[in-house]
Image (cartoon, helix red, strand yellow):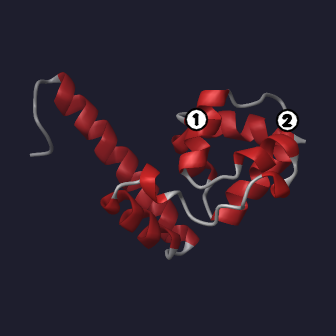
């Protein structure tokens, strides 16, 4: 039950599996397992999904009347740059979203390597 509601929320918000999983600090495979009911997210992971705009009470209970439905991520959880980036992302085609996710993942990996090497960013 939680898995199907989790998938409904992801689709309602327009996220791909990799992007939604990232909010939870999880891998795409983990999200797939959640959506199939193989396993369930932790409270910390659900908190991350709430930052993406997910209605966590609905995911857990199936009842949207317990809290107002959040259509957009709560403004106090995203800074202006993050909110603008998310707004732009949501306007992209699915192919462009996937391309942007690959670019972001590559940049994050490069930043991680640079940090490990003592660098301060991308040269």
Q: Which residue is mark 1?
A: 27
In this view, the residue in front, 34 or 76, is 76
Please name the residue shown 63% across and 50% down the image.
17
| Alpha carbons under labels 2 and 1: distance apart | 16 Å
In this view, the residue in front, 28 or 60, is 60
Q: Which residue is mark 2?
A: 37
Q: On the rendered structure, is 9 left or right of 63?
A: left
Please name the residue shown 57% across and 33% down the image.
26
Residue located farthest toward the right when viewing the structure as drawn: 1
In this view, the residue in front, 79 or 30, is 79
Label drawn at residue 54: none
In the rendered image, the vertical position of residue 2 relative to residue 112, given as above or below:
below
**SS of the residue at dot 2?**
loop
In the rendered image, the vertical position of residue 91 relative to residue 117, given as above or below:
below
Residue 1 image offset from top left, x and y in percent: 90, 42
Residue 18 seen from this side: no
Residue 35 seen from this side: yes
Q: On the rendered structure, is 74 left or right of 106?
A: right
């Amino acid at each position: 039950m939680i898995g199907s509601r989790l998938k409904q929320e992801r689709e309602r918000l327009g996220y791909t599996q990799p992007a939604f999983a990232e909010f939870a600090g999880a891998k795409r495979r983990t999200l797939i397992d959640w959506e199939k009911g193989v396993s369930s997210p932790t409270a910390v992971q659900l908190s991350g999904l709430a930052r993406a705009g997910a209605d966590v009470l609905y995911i857990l209970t199936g009842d949207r009347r317990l809290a107002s439905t959040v259509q957009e991520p709560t403004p106090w959880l995203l800074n202006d740059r993050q909110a603008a980036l998310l707004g732009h992302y949501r306007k992209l085609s699915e192919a462009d979203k996937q391309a942007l996710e690959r670019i972001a993942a590559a940049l994050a990996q490069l930043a991680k390597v640079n940090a490990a090497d003592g660098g301060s960013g991308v040269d």
